[in-house]
Amino acid sequence: MPDYSIGVDMGGTNLRIAAITTDGQLLEKITLGVKVAMGRDYVIAEMCDAIHRLTEQYRSTGRFVGAGIGVPGIIDMETGMMRKSANLPGWSDYPVRNVIEHHLGAKVFLDNDANVAALGEKWLGAGRDADNMAMLTLGTGIGGAIVLGGKLFYGLSGMAGEFGHVTVVPDGVPCGCGNRGCAERYASATAIVRMAREAIESGQAPELARAANADPEFSAKSIYNLAIQGDGAAQRIFERFGEVLGILLADLVNVLDLDMYVIGGGVVSAWDAFAPRMFAELRERSLVYAASAPDDSMAKKGASAQIASYAKKKTIITQALLGSDAGLYGAARIPASR
Ligand SMILES: [Zn+2]
């Protein structure tokens, strides 16, 4: 019987836990109705109880090699403490990893949620055949991670891959990080809703205004629905989204020249509304992408007018495959790969 590990995805809305064998077979997946708002100690106790139940249940399956936990925040990888998390007040400077290890009596690994999602896609998703890849998770913000030679690249402070906070508009919208004009202020689910509300206030978006009035949970999804029905104001929002994402990707491709860039997160389902503009920006702005673009038949402007696609290996920019399970698989992968 194969060994197995536990992956935990600590999202903002619920807590998901999976038992996964070291060769990638899902044994069981559970969702706890535990919200992080219920407080740190309660969440940790419920998580450990659920992990205990799973390890008891699969005791005869194989050896339990440990648990990996993806958390929305900045983690000090050496101490296993959280340094900063907008969504988890009360968790900062608390020895999360050690406390959970003590509860479980097993090895525990804590990592950033964007990092574990990238590991999941690398292990069993879109990045299976890519040794060098980056992942962008488009959701409330933009999560980012870099995988080099099959391993996460952490950088000096453990914060490598903060793509969401790359400046794309010098004097743009203020960001929670303290900067202005960060990419995630234009290319995230939150940004779509903000841009829609601004369009409504300007009086130029009657259909969006109607949708916002009718729907108390006016979301990126409702704005996408209007865009595919042909509403110009909604389409312009996804154009702007695609433009900024294209600028960000052009910068990443120029700097990193990786095999693959995987785009995940809830907003990726609006791919057809933003991707054409995203690819147009890439072709125009990145010489490196122009040299390695899989499709060389498009109109040649900017960088792509300077160089033909000559590289034998092509840059792949693609959608994630595992959806919201990427983080679960990736978290489980950490103890399994040690
Ligand atoms: Zn920022």
Image (spheres, rainbow, N blue to C red):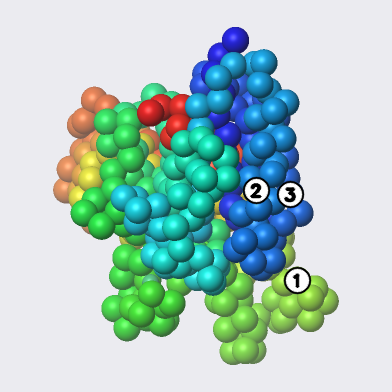
Residues packed near mark 1 inside 10 Å, few (<14), some (14 to 19) or many (20 plus): few
Q: Name the residue tied to disc 1.
A: 217
Q: Where is the N terminus found, in terms of image quarters?
A: top right
Asked if marks 3 and 1 touch (Cβ < 8 Å), the reply is no
Asked if marks 2 and 3 touch (Cβ < 8 Å), the reply is yes
**How far across and down, in percent of the image, does residue 227 sit?**
65, 63
Q: Is residue 273 visible?
A: no
Q: Amino acid at mark 3?
A: Leu
| Disc with the residue nearer the chain's start (2 vs 3) | 3
Q: Name the residue tied to disc 3.
A: 32
Give the image quadrant in which the ligand numbered 1 is located. bottom left
State how far apart marks 3 and 1 are (Cα).
23 Å
State how far apart marks 2 and 1 are (Cα).
29 Å
Q: Amino acid at mark 1?
A: Glu
State how far apart marks 2 and 3 are (Cα).
8 Å
Which label is found at residue 47?
2
Q: Is residue 31 visible?
A: yes
Name the residue rendered at 46%, 50% in the picture: 97
| Disc with the residue nearer the chain's start (3 vs 1) | 3
**How far across and down, in percent of the image, does residue 37 sit?**
66, 68
SS for dot 1: loop
